[in-house]
Image (cartoon, coloured by chain):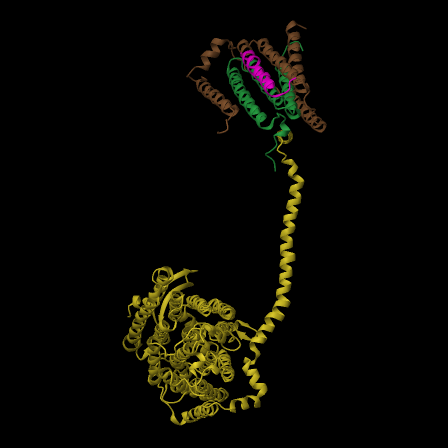
Chain colours: A brown, B yellow, C green
């Protein structure tokens, strides 16, 4: 068993364990922290697969952005120290069984499926290549989706402000 | 050819006047509406007189036979290439005669109404209804198509309904208008079915084609095969049409609406319920006369017996009534019965067609003198403000012109020569004598009774006790009411109609109107006329002896014939029979169960469905909980289901 | 099991996905539901990476998808939190079962 396999299993354990704890933990703040672990594990997985850029983005956006945002909103809204209300038993059982069943179903499908690899020369997923193709206007260029996403982000930003803005009652 | 536009204008002018009065006039110039209506009718009358002149003297006759001219034809509703409902104008002797009568009487009534209705708050509404009625009646007589006739037939019914119920704040008027509408509506159902039967078997709605096909031996041979309860389909068709006609013409047993219809304003009674609309039943029989007489001869017997029975029956009732308008109403029924049985005893063509000619002749003269009678009665009512005979008497000095014209009309209806009614009645009696002796004997009895009750009316109003104006001074609404002879607008029509009822009989009617279009001489057989005239004079003398002076004789006679008198006074309890049938039988046996079914079965099933839906929805509304996670769970379960399904199907 | 293959990574992503679904179904706090959604999104990202890496090494499309996904996830999180804060203002609660006005 080589070191890379060990690392992989550790990453897998962090991702899945973090995820599981994040959805079962009763204290909301801890739950957010477990989510953080899970996301860092995913970033680790990207590094492990030699996608350094993606790993960096994952950490910057998720760990540095979204999780912070979530924690921030937790402080804004909930009593972070208290236990959350217990989900009701019937729902837990039913959802647990359903997701477990679906999960097994999908896993069964995956193991039964034969994936065929494309044998081409590998393209290095480094920043240079990604940037070239992303901003290329030629074929297989992603400039249009890039612009669309930028507009989307702008719209989301304005939307957030509008939604969360406190509307002062007219005096 | 007569310019079709002019003919179309005859009915169109009244409808335009109706629209103007109803839409604009009522609000902006209510006092001028009467003049507008009168003016439009005057134009219509001039036009129809011109058309009549052109038709009878210039173009109508081809080789001695009056033609049926379709002046205008427009396919209105095309069902199949062969079958369509047309809007057309048909000119033949009877329709030309009718347009002249209708426009003339309507004109007279309009002029009269200007005086009679003066000061009424809804006078513009009144004149708009009159215009509507005139339009409908003209459309009815000019219709070239039986369905078009039906449309106008109903329009006439509606305008009659509106005018009977004109005094809508009077409960009896409202009840009368409802009654008239329901009874005639009931009969019209028969008419409609008759139309459908006739048009189904002859394949057309056009009068000309119906007559042509049904009288064609080759064609009717195949029709005779179709029979129902022993009568051929065609006979059923014409009998059903006759039921419609009987309803409109107030023949027994559908006569009950007409006496009540007298609740309307008196000029309306004169126009609609005496002179024009009620003869529509006679008119439809005359219109389809070849079908009646040639294709299904048995049906004419029905017409004859219904006619003579109604005639006698109404005459007996008329002798006992005390409301002068009701007397006139029963007299109308009786006279229309005359026209009906005259058609019933008539044959088709030549001398056989004497009854047809007599019937149309009587229609013509009757509309003149009956309108006169009603207008005269209206004038009397206007004067004394009462309909009851006992409130009248001795009016001859006070209203000399009304008295004179009323006398002329009474003489005319009694059949005294040389007044109008004599000539037409003699033709009818002669036709009856020639074909059916039983009908003849009943007819002369009726004629005698007619003379009796008309003069009973006349003497009761104008002679009998001396009238004391004091009685009535201040009688009306407590205000002093100066008694006076009717105004000029009311006297003018009386005088015109009075003159006409003297001279109308001298029209050589048979030359113009006959069953087959050929001229028919209406010379009189003086020897034949002796008996009816003598009997009429006997009737008059009886009336004179009973009613000229106040005396006990009528009462004695009434007590002598006690049972008969009371039952006649109560109109032979026909109304009560109808009430019994409707209230006791129809309401209890059909109405109540139907109401029960409606309440419990129909409503119950509806309520049940609603309750079921409600309970089901309250059971399943928990699914729509508004909780996001529930929805997600359903979605997720569905997704798994789909995946399983796809896997199952694809492997 | 000497080498880490595509299947291994797919197992991780599948598990993470269904963990997210489970969390979404059972959590009553809206913020934790949002966290579960983030898990679901991340499991998809893992899939993209894995397919790109093992099946189409000559292309970069998987990478782009992840980048866009992350951008959209960021936007989504921001909007969702704005909504949650707004709801908290009006309901004084971020329990999902309290926001059930849209029923029947």
Which stretch is magenta?
A57-80
Q: Which residue sits at x=60%, y=70%?
A: B583
- Give the image location of residue A13, x and y in percent: 67, 12
Q: Position of residue B60 (x, y in %)?
A: 31, 75
Q: Does residue B631 belong to the magenta stretch?
A: no
Q: Quadrant of the N terminus of chain B?
A: bottom left
Give the residue drawn at x 34%, y 62%.
B29
| Magenta run includes residue A70 | yes
Q: Is residue B634 visible?
A: yes
Decide if residue B61 is on the left or right side of residue B198: left
Q: Position of residue B631 (x, y in %)?
A: 62, 31
Q: Is residue C53 above or below residue B593?
A: above
Nearer-the-camera pick, B510 or A123: B510
Query: Which residue of the protein is positioned furthest toward the top in this rendering?
Result: A3
Q: Nearer the viewer, residue B163 or B142?
A: B163
Q: Picture coordinates of residue C28 (x, y %)?
A: 65, 25
Number of disc labels? 0
Instruction: Look at the magenta stretch and give its main secondary structure.
Output: helix
Up/down of C67 relative to B404, above or below = above
Q: Work out whether residue B647 can be spotted.
A: no
The quadrant where residue B277 appears: bottom left
Considering the image in quadrants, where does the C terminus of chain B appear? top right
């Amino acid at each position: 068993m080589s070191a890379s396999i060990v690392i992989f299993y550790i990453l897998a354990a962090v991702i899945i364990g973090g995820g599981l704890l994040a959805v079962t933990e009763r204290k909301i703040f801890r739950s957010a922290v477990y989510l953080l672990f899970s996301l860092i594990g995913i970033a680790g997985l990207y590094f492990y697969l030699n996608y350094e850029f993606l790993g960096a983005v994952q950490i910057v956006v998720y760990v540095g952005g979204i999780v912070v945002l979530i924690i921030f909103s937790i402080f804004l809204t909930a009593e972070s120290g208290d236990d959350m209300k217990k989900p009701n038993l019937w729902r837990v059982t039913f959802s647990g069984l359903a997701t477990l069943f679906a999960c097994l179903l999908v896993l069964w499908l995956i193991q039964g499926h034969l994936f065929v690899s494309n044998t081409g020369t590998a393209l290095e997923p480094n920043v240079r290549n990604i940037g070239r193709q992303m901003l290329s206007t030629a074929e297989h260029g992603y400039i249009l989706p890039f612009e669309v996403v930028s507009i989307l982000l702008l719209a989301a930003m304005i939307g957030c402000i509008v939604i969360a803005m406190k509307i002062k009652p007219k005096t | 050819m007569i310019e079709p536009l002019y003919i179309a204008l005859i009915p169109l002018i009244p409808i335009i006047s109706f629209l103007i009065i109803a839409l604009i006039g009522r609000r902006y110039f209510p006092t001028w509406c009467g003049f507008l209506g009168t003016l439009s009718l005057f134009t219509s009358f001039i036009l129809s007189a011109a058309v009549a002149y052109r038709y009878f003297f210039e173009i109508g006759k081809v080789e001695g036979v009056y033609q049926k001219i379709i002046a205008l034809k427009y396919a209105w509703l095309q069902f199949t290439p062969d079958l369509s409902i047309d809007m057309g104008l048909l000119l033949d002797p009877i329709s030309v005669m009718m347009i002249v009568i209708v426009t003339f009487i309507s004109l007279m009534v309009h002029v009269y109404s200007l005086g009679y209705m003066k000061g009424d708050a809804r006078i513009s509404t009144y004149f708009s209804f009159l215009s509507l009625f005139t339009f409908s009646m003209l459309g009815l007589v000019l219709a070239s198509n039986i369905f078009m006739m039906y449309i106008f037939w109903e329009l006439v019914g509606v305008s009659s309904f509106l005018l009977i119920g004109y005094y809508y704040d009077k409960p009896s008027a409202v009840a009368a208008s409802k009654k008239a509408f329901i009874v005639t509506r009931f009969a019209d159902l028969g008419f409609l079915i008759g139309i459908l039967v006739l048009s189904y078997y002859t394949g057309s709605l056009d009068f000309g084609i119906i007559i042509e096909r049904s009288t064609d031996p080759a064609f009717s041979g195949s029709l005779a095969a179709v029979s129902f309860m022993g009568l051929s389909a065609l006979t059923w068709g014409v009998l059903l049409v006759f039921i419609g006609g009987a309803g409109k013409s107030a023949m027994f047993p559908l006569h009950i609406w007409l006496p009540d219809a007298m609740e309307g304003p008196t000029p309306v009674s004169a126009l609609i319920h005496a002179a024009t609309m009620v003869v529509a039943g006679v008119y439809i029989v005359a219109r389809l006369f070849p079908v009646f007489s040639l294709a299904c001869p048995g049906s004419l017997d029905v017409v004859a017996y219904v006619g003579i029975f109604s005639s006698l029956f109404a005459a007996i009732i008329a002798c006992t009534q005390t409301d002068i308008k009701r007397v006139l109403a029963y007299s109308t029924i009786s006279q229309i019965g005359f026209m009906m049985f005259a058609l019933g005893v008539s044959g088709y063509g030549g001398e056989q067609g004497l009854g047809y000619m007599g019937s149309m002749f009587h229609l013509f003269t009757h509309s003149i003198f009956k309108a006169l009678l009603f207008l005269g009665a209206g004038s009397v009512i206007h004067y004394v403000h009462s309909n009851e005979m006992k409130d009248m008497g001795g009016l001859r000095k006070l209203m000399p012109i009304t008295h004179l014209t009323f006398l002329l009309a009474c003489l005319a209806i009694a059949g005294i020569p040389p007044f109008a009614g004599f000539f037409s009645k003699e033709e009818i009696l002669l036709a009856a004598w020639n074909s059916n002796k039983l009908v003849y004997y009943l007819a002369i009895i009726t004629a005698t009774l007619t003379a009796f009750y008309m003069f009973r009316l006349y003497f009761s109003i104008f002679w009998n006790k001396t009238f004391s104006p004091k009685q009535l001074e201040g009688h009306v609404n407590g205000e002093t009411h100066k008694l006076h002879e009717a105004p000029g607008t009311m006297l003018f029509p009386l005088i015109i109609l009075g003159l006409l009822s003297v001279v109308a009989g001298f029209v050589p009617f048979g030359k113009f109107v006959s069953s087959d279009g050929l001229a028919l001489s209406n010379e009189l057989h003086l020897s034949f006329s002796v008996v009816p005239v003598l009997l009429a004079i006997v009737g008059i003398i009886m009336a004179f002896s009973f009613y000229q002076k106040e005396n006990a004789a009528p009462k004695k006679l009434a007590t002598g014939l006690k049972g008969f008198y009371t039952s006649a006074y109560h109109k032979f309890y026909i109304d009560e029979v109808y009430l019994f049938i409707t209230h006791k039988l129809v309401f209890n046996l059909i109405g109540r169960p139907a109401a029960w079914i409606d309440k419990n079965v129909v409503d119950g099933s509806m309520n049940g469905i609603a309750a079921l839906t409600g309970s089901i929805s309250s059971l399943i509304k928990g699914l729509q909980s508004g909780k996001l996670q529930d929805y997600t769970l359903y979605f997720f379960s569905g997704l798994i289901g789909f995946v399983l399904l796809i896997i199952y199907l694809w492997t | 099991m000497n080498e880490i293959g595509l299947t291994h990574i797919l197992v991780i992503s599948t598990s993470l996905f269904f963990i997210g679904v489970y969390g979404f179904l059972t959590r009553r706090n809206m913020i934790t539901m949002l966290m579960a959604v983030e898990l679901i999104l991340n499991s998809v990202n893992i899939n993209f990476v894995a397919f790109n890496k093992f099946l189409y090494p000559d292309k970069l499309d998987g990478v782009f998808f992840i980048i866009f996904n992350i951008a959209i996830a960021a936007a989504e999180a921001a909007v969702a939190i704005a909504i949650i804060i707004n709801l908290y203002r009006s309901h004084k609660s971020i329990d999902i079962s309290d926001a059930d006005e849209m029923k029947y």
